[in-house]
Image (cartoon, helix red, strand yellow):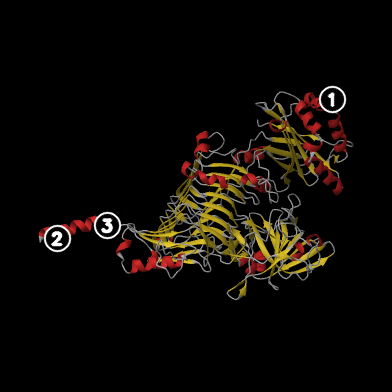
Amino acid sequence: MKQLVACIVVLTLILPLTAAAANIYVAVNGSDKNAGTKDAPFTTVARALRKAREMRRLNNPSVFNGIHIIVGGGVYQFYEPLFIRSEDAGTKESPTYMEAAANEQPVFSGGISITGWHLLKENIGGLPAVARGKVWVADVPVQNGVPLNFRQFWVNNIKAVRAKDGNGDTMHRILSWDHTTGTCWIPTPHTNDLANASSLEMFIHQWWATAVLRVKKIEVHGDSSKLSFYQPESNIQNEHPWPAPWISTETGNSAFYLTNAIQFLDEPGEWYLDVAHQKIYYWPRKSERLSTATVTAPVLETLVKMEGTIDHPVQHFFINGIAFEHTGWLRPSQQGHVPHQAGFFMTDAYKLKPAGTTDKPNLDNQAWIGRPAAAVQVNYAENVTISNCRFEHLASTGLDFNKGTHNNTVIGNLFKDIGGSSILAGVFTDEGAEIHQTYNPTDDREVCDSMHISNNLITDVTNEDWGCVGIGLGYTKNSLVEHNEVENVSYTGISMGWGWNAAPNAMKNNRIIVNKIHHYGKHNYDCSGIYTLSAQANSFIEENYVDSIFKAPYAHLPSHWFYLYTDEGSSYLTIKNNWTPSTKYLQNANGPGNMWSNNGPQVDAAIKQNSGLQPQYQSLLKEKTASTVKQSINQQHKEIIEIITQQNDALNIEKLQQLLAENNIDSNALYQWHNHYVIFDNIADPGNMQSKLHKAFPDANVKAYFNMYYQFSKQQHCTDTVVAKDWDNIILTANLVADKKAQEQYLAYHATQFEQFPGVTKGFCNADFQQLLCFKSGRQLMLVISIPKGKTLDGLNPRTTEGNPQMMKWNTLMSKYQEGIEGTKPGEVWVFFKQIHNN
């Protein structure tokens, strides 16, 4: 008997080691009436998941080593989200796997095909004449008895463009904004028959975010038109102070375009949805044949909802090799979209009068936010891994780990063609809490803990909501973001933190390390490769490679971009050994305890080489898109700020030099002509420095020259690219003539000088000029000529015209557009500043 018991015990120990996991199969040609075996697969993942749930509920012995839901290749059209609940949780010994079959690519799609296309032959009211005979039409699909509404539309998986009033990347500038009446004045559109455009929208760029406003009414008054907007977005847009429409004579008012009217359907690749008549109109691109193309519109906003509870989280669930595609997001069509930051839309917001709360005496605004929809949404889940998946053709967030998420991993995935952020993790602000309140919940299990985001390629994301981010961490702790590559994003690459507050909170022990971030800031500034907010005890930003920020054409401040940016309340962070092309960093209203060391171009080249995807994940790099963007890259250059005193008032030079030193600006970078004083140096944030100078010298006029309209570089434009070790900078000033048309001609000549007047470049090279920079503020011009130290401008300048008739022609031409500033002598145009040396 004892021998029999011993045998049973031995068998009990051996069987778990040799037992296979349970396999459940899904195939597009299966049936949910099947058994879910390899030979008789299910046809929906939901049915397979239900079987797995039942096997666990009934303690089926086959699940001892786990359950594998094996999904065959093909497109699985979802009509509701796949719900993964606490009952689907595995264990460490018996996880649940949802995975692609070997060498196959299953696609979970929230889209529906649009078929029945034919060339539009009849005339449709409002359709531009240029589009007639070129536009195709199809009936809008009916879903659950209701015609489908959507904001995205893909032809052969290439996103089409909702018809808008500017072709290509063109945007217009608002004329003014009246917050009291909630109205905006714009130049009257070329298409002036918009009175009956019932679904017209305005897309507007404002500082670090964009907004979508549904137009209630457009009133045409000659060459100007007044817009008013629907609620609730109108109140939010007009009452909140940050971000707001930008009004500036120096850098241009906020850019915008109008969209969603058939009157704008005037170029290939554009489409218009006629909700009232249930028709969709599209002008195909040259390469597209709608008779054979796959045309997709989104039905769902979320494909997968993994939702446990605080006491019963989803656990030990692995998703591998799945593609998540074609989701929409309809909130902007239903309530507008006015984000505060990183795509989080405001549900209520207003300016505080007078300023101040108990926690923040100087706070001037309050706001409450909502979280945008995500294709895959996770709450209360632990030990979940999402690997080797593709997140593509999505309207809003790709993947979102929100509340109560612990020890989760996102590794080796592709995020591409996404309207919002690729990955969000952690609570940012609960919907019932004001955004500046410190988040530190009583039940620590709410906090996102030990999030691991590694070796993902993130490219062409934030392509609809330009204020979203590549990777966004809210209130997380013990989290690690490493070896990711982030490129082709409209705003910040990696953002960590929330709250604008230096008070202790739930964030601590987070690390952003060994990432490669480049080609960011495509549309919005006040951004950086890596950006932080609020106190983050014992957190590290190390050994990242940040490079190549785009020149955003509609930036509110052209210099307000950075490689590293610790914003309001950032505290207890260590930022070291990060490679960047220069030290263009911003530390804005930081709290205590930050440590910066060894960041910049001098960092070991191995940092660049080791950053980004590790070798086993580099097959993803073939999906990169930044090289397809035809947009210039910013290079840090010295900035100009001018201080103009009253004619007989002397400036306190000692006070000014002390202020410059406090802001890491060379106190010798100061020049004077009469009552005009110029600072010319590397200034990380000219706007912020301008404000400090205003405060220090309230009786003076302080001008920042944000518009650098021309740049010559010996390294870039000359055959001899060797530059002198030390330079002298010659600074001159003059005015443009008052005639607006002449000013436009002057700027146009400079914009095309390298192509149209190559002799000018030749002259500068002959003279051994190291660089020329031309700045403009209003009518006033600043010219900086950098020459080798020890040389003189009088000695070098004649070389520019030697045997160079085109340079002489250029000089004669330019003289028509220039005149002296106030205080110059009759006939005097350009005047020289003299350097003030610090004694």
Crowdedness near tag 3: few (<14), some (14–19) or many (≥20) residues, C-alpha within 10 Å: some
Q: Earlier in the sequence, mark 3 or mark 2?
A: 2
Which residue is located at x 70 percent, y 51 percent? 554
User: Taking 302 as reference, is 788 above or below it?
Assistant: above
Residue 718: in sight, yes or no?
A: yes
Q: Earlier in the sequence, mark 1 or mark 2?
A: 2
Determine the residue located farthest toward the left in the rendered image.
1
Label 3 SS: helix
Cβ atoms at labels 3 and 1 below 8 Å apart: no
Whole-number angstrom distance, CA of label 3 to CA of label 2: 18 Å
Q: Which mark is residue 16?
A: 3
Whole-number angstrom distance, CA of label 3 to CA of label 1: 90 Å
Q: Nearer the viewer, residue 624 or 733?
A: 624
Q: Amino acid at mark 3?
A: Pro
Crowdedness near tag 1: few (<14), some (14–19) or many (≥20) residues, C-alpha within 10 Å: few
Determine the residue located farthest toward the front in the rendered image.
39
Cβ atoms at labels 1 and 2 below 8 Å apart: no
Residue that label 2 marks:
5
* Residue 244 picture location, percent across and down: 67, 59
* Residue 478 picture location, percent across and down: 42, 51
Q: Nearer the viewer, residue 354 or 531?
A: 531
Q: Amino acid at mark 2?
A: Val
Q: How many marks?
A: 3
Crowdedness near tag 2: few (<14), some (14–19) or many (≥20) residues, C-alpha within 10 Å: few
Quadrant where the image shows the N terminus = bottom left
Q: Which mark is residue 803?
A: 1
Q: Earlier in the sequence, mark 3 or mark 1?
A: 3
Q: Which mark is residue 212?
A: none
Determine the residue located farthest toward the right in the rendered image.
826
Which residue is located at x 85 percent, y 31 percent? 806
Q: Amino acid at mark 1?
A: Gly
